[in-house]
């Protein structure tokens, strides 16, 4: 069963508007040029649409093996119930079934991620809640959850990694108003909150190692500053100055999805996918830009390159191998 087909079908807004692949402009990229993929292109690739629940408004989506059987479940946040639902594919019935859900959060779920935050062997859930902050749903097993508020500031996105390499999972969260916070885990479900590097406003910063030193760095678009931002993790909970390019994109530079920083060309450098509007915010046309990673990992740099200009409002953006050909593709959502 193709999980990507199920995951896409669960979301009420899916990929739209077929656009042609963009020819390469650099010879060394000719064999791995990313192409924008749409639903119209994806259907012939054995994707079978399924809509397990058409009565709920869903927003964030995540994949994780919640029951430890070696197969990923779909976690998806419902704005209709304010709960995170867990859907599992049933091979006998050949469809996804709702097998579990968390208690209700206080408001809309913007983002979610997973990790074993208390080291009890079960995956826990981190949720970014509109207007209320970062929440942790500790997995007690057998469908029982303990929900707590880790940081009470409007949050857009959460990601989990051992950022300081102390053996405990940490949480990175993008907050409303431009701040970011890193909640350093103590390994028992408790955290120490430390302000992260400076941003204007971001919904989708990636935790990714862009200099290959084994430490997760921060990279992504900044909506207010209009720049791609990149901060190197120097260890010891210390970050570098911004290493991103100075190129300025004034209208809503963002991606609204992670991972949106990937090695698109297979050259060992991370590239950042983003988009911006040509004139006013949210008014098409919208340009898709790739900040192409260049140089040695020890001294990374990025050069922006326009991939395409689209006649509609298209978010989120991200990258994945959508057609199983071994090359990463760029996907774009959209609305009119």
Image (cartoon, rainbow, N blue to C red):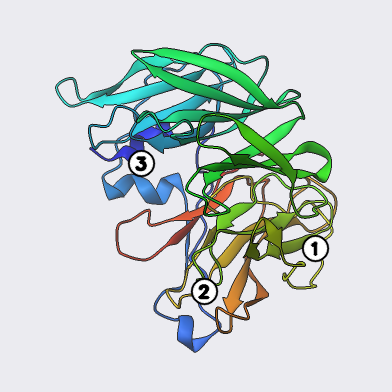
Q: Which mark is residue 269?
A: 2
* Residue 280 % position (x, y): 85, 50
Q: In 3D space, how far apart are the residues under numbered discs 2 and 1 (Cα atoms)?
A: 22 Å
Residue 98 visible in this rendered orientation of the protein:
yes
Question: In what element is the residue under mark 1?
Answer: loop
Q: Is residue 51 above or below residue 211?
A: above
Question: In what element is the residue under mark 3?
Answer: helix
Q: Which mark is residue 25?
A: none
**What residue does disc 3 label?**
4
Instruction: Determine the residue positioned at 40% across, 37% down.
Output: 63
**What residue does disc 1 label?**
249
Mark 2 vs 1, N-terminal side? 1
Which of discs 2 and 1 lies nearer the camera? The answer is 2
Instruction: Determine the residue positioned at 42% across, 33% down.
Output: 119
Q: Are marks 2 and 1 in contact (CB under 8 Å)?
A: no
Q: Is residue 26 above or below residue 323?
A: below
Task: Give the camera-side residue of 100 and 35.
Answer: 100
Mark 2 vs 3, N-terminal side? 3
Q: Quadrant of residue 183?
A: top right
* Residue 296 % position (x, y): 55, 84
| Number of other residues with Cα within 10 Å of mark 3, as a class: few under 14, some 14 to 19, many 20 or more | some
Mark 3 vs 1, N-terminal side? 3
Which of discs 2 and 3 lies nearer the camera? The answer is 2
Q: In 3D space, how far apart are the residues under numbered discs 3 and 1 (Cα atoms)?
A: 32 Å
Q: Is residue 269 above or below residue 138?
A: below
* Residue 71 % position (x, y): 26, 36
Q: Quadrant of residue 79?
A: top right
| Number of other residues with Cα within 10 Å of mark 2, as a class: few under 14, some 14 to 19, many 20 or more | many
Q: Quadrant of residue 239?
A: bottom right
Instruction: Determine the residue positioned at 20% across, 25% down.
Output: 94
Q: In 3D space, how far apart are the residues under numbered discs 2 and 3 (Cα atoms)?
A: 26 Å
């Amino acid at each position: 069963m193709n999980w990507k087909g199920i995951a896409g079908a669960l979301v009420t807004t899916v990929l739209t508007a077929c656009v042609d692949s963009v020819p390469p402009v650099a010879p060394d990229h000719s064999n791995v040029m990313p192409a924008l993929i749409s639903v119209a292109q994806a259907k012939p690739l054995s994707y079978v649409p399924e809509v397990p629940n058409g009565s709920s408004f869903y927003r964030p989506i995540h994949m994780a093996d919640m029951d430890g059987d070696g197969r990923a479940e779909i976690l998806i946040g419902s704005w209709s119930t304010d709960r995170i639902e867990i859907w599992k594919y049933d091979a006998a019935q050949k469809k996804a079934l709702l097998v579990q859900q968390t208690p209700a959060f206080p408001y809309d779920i913007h983002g979610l991620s997973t990790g074993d935050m208390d080291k009890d062997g079960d995956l826990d859930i981190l949720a970014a809640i509109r207007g209320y902050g970062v929440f942790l749903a500790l997995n007690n097993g057998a469908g029982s959850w303990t929900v707590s508020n880790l940081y009470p500031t409007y949050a857009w996105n959460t990601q989990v990694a051992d950022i300081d390499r102390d053996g405990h999972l940490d949480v990175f969260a993008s907050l409303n108003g431009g701040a970011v916070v890193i909640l350093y885990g103590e390994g028992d479900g408790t955290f120490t909150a430390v302000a992260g590097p400076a941003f204007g406003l971001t919904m989708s910063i990636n935790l990714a190692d862009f200099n290959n030193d084994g430490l997760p760095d921060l990279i992504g678009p900044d909506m207010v500053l209009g720049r791609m931002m990149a901060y190197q993790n120097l260890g010891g909970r210390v970050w570098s100055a911004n290493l991103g390019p100075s190129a300025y994109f004034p209208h809503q530079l963002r991606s609204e999805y992670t991972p949106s920083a990937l090695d698109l060309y297979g050259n060992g450098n991370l590239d950042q996918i983003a988009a911006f509007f040509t004139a006013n915010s949210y008014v098409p046309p919208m340009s898709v830009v790739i900040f192409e990673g260049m140089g040695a990992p020890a001294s990374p740099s990025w050069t922006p390159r326009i991939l395409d200009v689209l006649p509609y409002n298209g978010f989120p953006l991200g990258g994945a191998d959508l057609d199983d050909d071994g090359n990463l593709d760029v996907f774009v959502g959209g609305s009119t």
